[in-house]
Image (cartoon, rainbow, N blue to C red):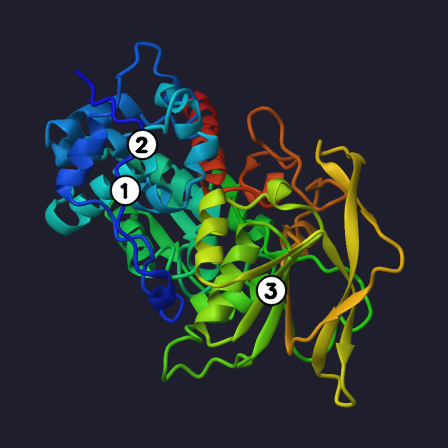
């Protein structure tokens, strides 16, 4: 008989006024007792709607049933059968829009805490379990993967399990992609990412870092090295800007640069020689998860005042509700229905403030959200000494500019067919490089589909 408690088992967290001064993980995770209690809320529905909401097809009721019995290692094996990065997904997936969004328990209460349980199982295995030896029979075929982010790592892991010799070419000095340069330590500890990467290496995946494809090697040169298929999972790391006056002033960052300096280059750690401006007041422009990450990082670096400036209302924000809630708890101030018009500077072209205009919501636009419209004459100034632009990203043009015959959309996203093949024969692509900036789990789903398509083609050949 399922536990019909209407709300999720609460997960312990650091106190807001403590955690906004450190980079330790905010959510502390379930104990075994909490996990078993939460698992017993699952109804084990016959039609398994939660599974249909998972981009990587984790058999959710099966792993939760094992958690309820206390078989945490068995639960881990169920998850790992389709998910190469469970500790990551348990922390950063938007479960409320995916698996948990389809949970039957959510109709008359809160859904089962699927993400919390996945995180618990993955952490339990990392701390107490031991990876089973995998007997992989090599098939003699070589596949190259460009980018060691969620899409690339997932594709590489799936192909390695099928017997392919997989080499991953990563531009940075550390594997993980957005997991290491974009998502802060307090949401996703880098030790967790490193452990997931090491698990893939035990499958035989070879990861080569500092390999900027388009400069060190081209697509044609990779083909000449004997790789029979190539998967491009290079993400979308090129930041967008507004094009307003003063946007190139000293003290204006893209969220990508700001977060990369903090997360990958350890600007928050004493002893690391990573330049980053120590600010008193900062405005973060945007309303997505990246904007929340940037704002919360700025607070932890010592900023007294952190403002999130967003041109729509709170209900229209694309950021996860949990991230907005945490940001508010951490004393981040939100300026809704406001849009910057220019960045103010001093005689040395350093930021002194940001001029904004108030907005109102009109008719829905192409995205279905109500279009923000200016209220003329409503300009006002926020005094800040730094501005972080978090307006979205697009794929870096380096690969598309050096790969002959690679077709892209006007926004620079790689065009693929139903089998995820690009306009270059034998070259596949997926994740943010194709869709534009999206979620970690959607990129992982693309990596899985590409691996299956590559295997189907190469086995047929």
42 sits left or right of 155 in the view: left
Visible residue check, residue 135: no
Residue extending furthest bottom?
Answer: 347
**Which tag, 3 or 2, sits closer to the chain's start?**
2
Of the 4 image quadrants, the one containing the N terminus is: top left
303 sits left or right of 389 in the view: left
Residue under pointer 2: 7
Instruction: Identify which residue, 151 or 32, lies in the foreground.
Output: 32
Q: Residue 307 carries which label?
A: 3
Q: Do the residues labelled 1 and 2 touch (CB within 8 Å)?
A: yes
Q: How crowded is mark 2: few (under 14 residues within 10 Å), some or many (20 or more)?
A: some
Q: In which quarter of the image is residue 458?
A: top left
Q: Are marks 1 and 3 in contact (CB under 8 Å)?
A: no
**Which tag, 1 or 3, sits closer to the chain's start?**
1
> Separation of disc 3 and disc 2 at Cα?
32 Å
Of helix, strand and loop, which one carries label 3? strand
Position above or below: 270 against 84: below
Position above or below: 138 against 306: above
> Separation of disc 1 and disc 2 at Cα?
8 Å
Q: How crowded is mark 1: few (under 14 residues within 10 Å), some or many (20 or more)?
A: few
Q: Where is residue 269 in the image (x, y as percent from the top left)?
A: 37, 77
Residue under pointer 1: 10
230 sits left or right of 207 in the view: right
Q: Where is residue 79 in the image (x, y as percent from the top left)?
A: 27, 32
């Amino acid at each position: 008989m399922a536990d019909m408690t209407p709300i999720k088992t609460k997960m312990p967290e650091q106190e807001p006024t403590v955690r906004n001064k450190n980079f330790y993980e905010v959510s502390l995770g379930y104990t075994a007792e909490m996990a078993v209690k939460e698992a017993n809320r699952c109804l084990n529905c016959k039609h398994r709607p939660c599974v249909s909401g998972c981009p990587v097809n984790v058999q959710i009721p099966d792993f939760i049933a094992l958690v309820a019995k206390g078989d945490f290692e068995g639960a881990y094996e169920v998850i790992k059968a389709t998910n190469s990065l469970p500790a990551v997904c348990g922390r950063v997936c938007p479960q409320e829009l995916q698996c948990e969004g389809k949970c039957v328990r959510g109709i008359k209460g809160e859904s089962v805490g699927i993400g919390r349980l996945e995180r618990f199982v993955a952490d339990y295995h990392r701390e107490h379990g031991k990876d089973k030896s995998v007997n992989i029979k090599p098939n003699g075929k070589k596949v190259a993967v460009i980018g060691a982010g969620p899409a690339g790592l997932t594709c590489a892991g799936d192909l390695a399990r099928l017997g392919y010799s997989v080499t991953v070419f990563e531009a940075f000095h550390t594997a993980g992609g957005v997991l290491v340069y974009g998502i802060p330590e307090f949401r996703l500890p880098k030790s967790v990412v490193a452990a997931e990467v090491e698990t893939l290496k035990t499958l035989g995946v070879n990861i080569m870092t500092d390999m900027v494809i388009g400069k060190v090697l081209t697509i044609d040169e990779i083909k000449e090295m004997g790789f029979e298929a190539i998967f491009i999972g290079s993400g979308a790391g090129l930041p967008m800007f507004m094009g307003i006056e003063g946007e190139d002033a000293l003290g204006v960052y893209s969220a990508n640069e700001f977060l990369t300096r903090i997360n990958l280059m350890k600007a928050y750690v004493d002893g690391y020689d990573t330049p980053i401006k120590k600010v008193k007041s900062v405005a973060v422009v945007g309303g997505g998860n990246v904007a929340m990450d940037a704002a919360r990082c700025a607070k932890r670096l010592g900023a007294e005042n952190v403002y999130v400036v967003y041109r729509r209302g709170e209900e229209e924000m694309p950021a996860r509700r949990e991230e907005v809630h945490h940001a508010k708890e951490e004393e981040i101030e939100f300026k809704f229905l406001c849009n910057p018009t220019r960045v103010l500077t001093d005689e040395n072209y350093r930021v002194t403030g940001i001029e904004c205009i108030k907005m109102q919501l009109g008719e829905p636009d192409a995205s279905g959200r109500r279009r923000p419209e200016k209220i003329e004459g409503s300009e006002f100034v926020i005094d800040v000494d730094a501005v972080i632009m978090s307006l979205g990203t697009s794929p870096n043009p380096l690969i598309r500019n050096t790969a002959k015959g690679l077709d892209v959309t006007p926004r620079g996203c790689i065009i693929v067919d139903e089998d995820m093949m690009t306009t270059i024969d034998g070259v596949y692509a997926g994740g943010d490089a194709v869709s534009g900036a999206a979620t970690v789990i959607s990129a992982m789903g693309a990596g899985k589909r590409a691996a299956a398509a590559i295997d189907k083609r190469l086995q047929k050949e």
